[in-house]
């Protein structure tokens, strides 16, 4: 099976992200446990030593720059990847399917997944053209 280049990129980036030192907690008991694993308590002082990443994920404040550095690297990779028209359309089609855009016939839900805004798509002739082409292709491939 030939793998989608965009999916390969996302899988590589996901693998890199999973290597970062973070923990997840979805309740007080789990939160207390991860703090204990870090040798911390839930005291006001120790809470200043962690950073909330979102979606229940945390890291030590000293490790937060690693997340920022990787986010910048991934953004640069995405920008470079999207310079190729075929890659950009492939990414859009993947995200159209991933965000179930067919159900509501709304392709715009996929834009955010590519770290873009509707304004960026509308105001860039190349991106706007590719977006329309990708949506048309996606619809014809998913009849």
Image (cartoon, grey):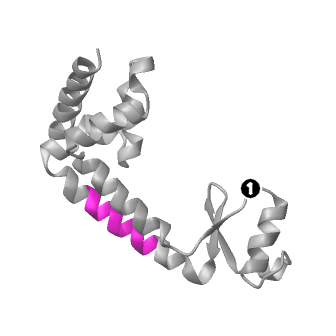
Report the number of numbered marks: 1
- Along the viewing direction, whichever of 1 and 59 lies nearer the viewer: 1
- Looking at this view, name the residue that lies furthest to the front: 1
- Along the viewing direction, whichever of 46 and 93 lies nearer the viewer: 93
Position of the C terminus, as image quadrant, is top left
Point 13% across, 43% down: residue: 85
For residue 124, what is the image quadrant? Answer: top left
User: Magenta-highlighted stretch: main secondary structure?
Assistant: helix
For residue 71, what is the image quadrant? Answer: bottom left
Point 44% across, 18% down: residue: 104
Residue 96 lies, in percent from the top left, at 35, 32
- Answer few, some or many: residues within 10 Å of disc 1's Cα (few below 14, many 20 plus, some between 14 and 19): few
Point 29% across, 56% down: residue: 9
Q: Which residue is mark 1?
A: 26
Side (left or right) of 46 relative to 22? right
- Looking at this view, name the residue that lies furthest to the top: 143
Side (left or right) of 13 relative to 86? right
Residue 115 lies, in percent from the top left, at 38, 49
For residue 43, what is the image quadrant? Answer: bottom right
Instruction: Please say whether residue 73 is one of the residues in the magenta stretch.
Output: yes
Point 63% across, 78% down: residue: 60
Instruction: Please say whether residue 104 is one of the residues in the magenta stretch.
Output: no
Look at the picture and state if 75 lies above or below 50.
above
Side (left or right) of 2 relative to 29? left
The residue range painted magenta reads: 68-78
Look at the picture and state if 82 lies above or below 110.
below
Residue 92 lies, in percent from the top left, at 28, 37
Q: Secondary structure at mark 1?
A: loop
Position of the N terminus, as image quadrant, is top left
């Amino acid at each position: 099976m030939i793998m989608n280049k965009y999916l390969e990129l996302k899988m590589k980036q996901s693998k890199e992200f999973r290597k970062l030192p973070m923990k997840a907690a979805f309740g007080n008991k789990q939160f207390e446990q991860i703090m204990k694993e870090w040798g911390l308590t839930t005291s006001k002082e120790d809470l200043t030593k962690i950073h909330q990443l979102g979606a229940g994920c945390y890291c030590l404040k000293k490790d937060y720059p690693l997340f920022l550095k990787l986010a910048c690297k991934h953004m640069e990779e995405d920008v470079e990847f999207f310079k190729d028209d075929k890659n950009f359309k492939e990414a859009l089609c993947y995200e159209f399917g991933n965000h179930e855009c067919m159900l509501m016939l709304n392709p715009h839900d996929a834009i955010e997944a590519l770290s873009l805004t509707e304004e960026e798509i509308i105001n860039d002739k190349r991106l706007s053209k590719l977006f329309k082409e990708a949506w048309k292709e996606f619809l014809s491939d998913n009849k």
